[in-house]
Image (tube, rainbow, N blue to C red):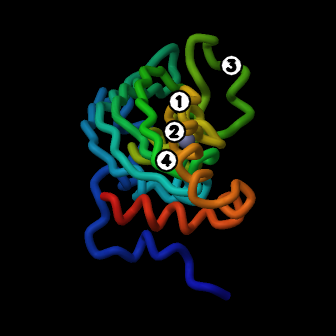
């Protein structure tokens, strides 16, 4: 059997990764500010071809009709790899949502429509999990540059040097070039 995720064996886990007791923080109306590097979010990093940038904001816990809720406000920029030209693409992220924190999925139907249900297994959830959930929902699975101009300029330059077929078979050569430009 392979070792479990090494994330949990780091000597100093960031405060946002700490599991919080949902009942306690919602009754105490506790708020947490955060600033998270996207590469530190394991599920997001595993889904994306490449991810960087950071988001900051605040999570405010509270109650709504007897349900634990979390208001998540986050702003930042995700840097992902454009799946068309293989260069970095900056994606602004801005979210403001109210989540219902549920201990089991069966309770989702009882939640007010203005709240987005999120599962807090065992009554625990971390600020990082809430932020990551929102990023997974809002960031594209296949990131590409917004306008054709950004990608178009690159492929025009690349095609001048090599046939298009050779470029598409060597995505990491393009990445290496891109990294050396930093
Ligand atoms: Zn592109």
Q: Which numbered disc flags the more N-terminal residue, 1 or 3?
A: 3
Residue at image location 47% in from the left, 52% down from the top: 51
Please tell me which of labels 4 and 3 falls first in the chain: 4
Residue tagged 3: 110
Q: Would you identify the image quadrant in which residue 77 lies?
A: top left
Is tag 2's residue or tag 4's residue first in the polypeptide sequence? 4
Q: How many marks?
A: 4
Q: Identify the disc placed on residue 56.
A: none
Label 2 and label 4: CA atoms lie apart by 18 Å
For the C terminus, the quadrant is bottom left
**Residue occupying the point 60% across, 39% down:** 119
Identified at 57% across, 43% down, the residue is 156
In terms of image quarters, where does ligand 1 lie?
top right
**Percent x, y of residue 65:** 51, 14
Counting other residues with Cα less than 10 Å from the Cα at mark 4, is it few (<14), some (14-19), or many (20 or more)? many
Q: Regarding mark 2 in the picture, which secondary structure is present there?
A: helix
CA distance separating discs 4 and 3: 37 Å
Can residue 97 be seen at all in this image of the molecule?
yes
**For numbered disc 3, what is the local secondary structure?**
helix
Q: Is residue 72 above or below residue 132?
A: above
Give residue 153's mark: 2
Of pointers 4 and 1, the one earlier in the residue sequence: 4
**Name of the residue lying farthest toward the bottom:** 1
Where is residue 154? Give x, y as percent. 52, 45
């Amino acid at each position: 059997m392979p070792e479990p995720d090494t994330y949990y064996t780091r000597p100093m886990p960031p405060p946002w990764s700490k599991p919080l007791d949902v009942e306690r923080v919602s009754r105490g109306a506790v708020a947490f500010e955060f600033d998270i590097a996207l590469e530190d979010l394991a599920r997001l990093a595993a889904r994306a071809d490449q991810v960087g940038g950071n988001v900051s904001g605040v999570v405010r816990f509270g109650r709504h009709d007897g349900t634990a809720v979390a208001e998540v406000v986050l702003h930042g920029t995700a840097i992902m790899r454009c799946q068309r030209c293989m260069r970095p693409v900056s994606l602004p992220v801005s979210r403001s949502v109210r989540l219902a924190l549920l201990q089991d999925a069966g309770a989702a139907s009882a939640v007010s429509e203005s709240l987005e249900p999120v599962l807090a297994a065992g009554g625990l959830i971390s600020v990082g999990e809430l932020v990551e959930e929102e990023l997974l929902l809002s960031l594209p699975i296949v990131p590409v540059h917004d306008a054709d101009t950004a990608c178009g300029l690159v492929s025009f330059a690349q095609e001048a040097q090599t046939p298009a077929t050779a470029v598409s078979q060597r995505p990491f050569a393009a990445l290496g070039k891109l990294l050396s430009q930093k």
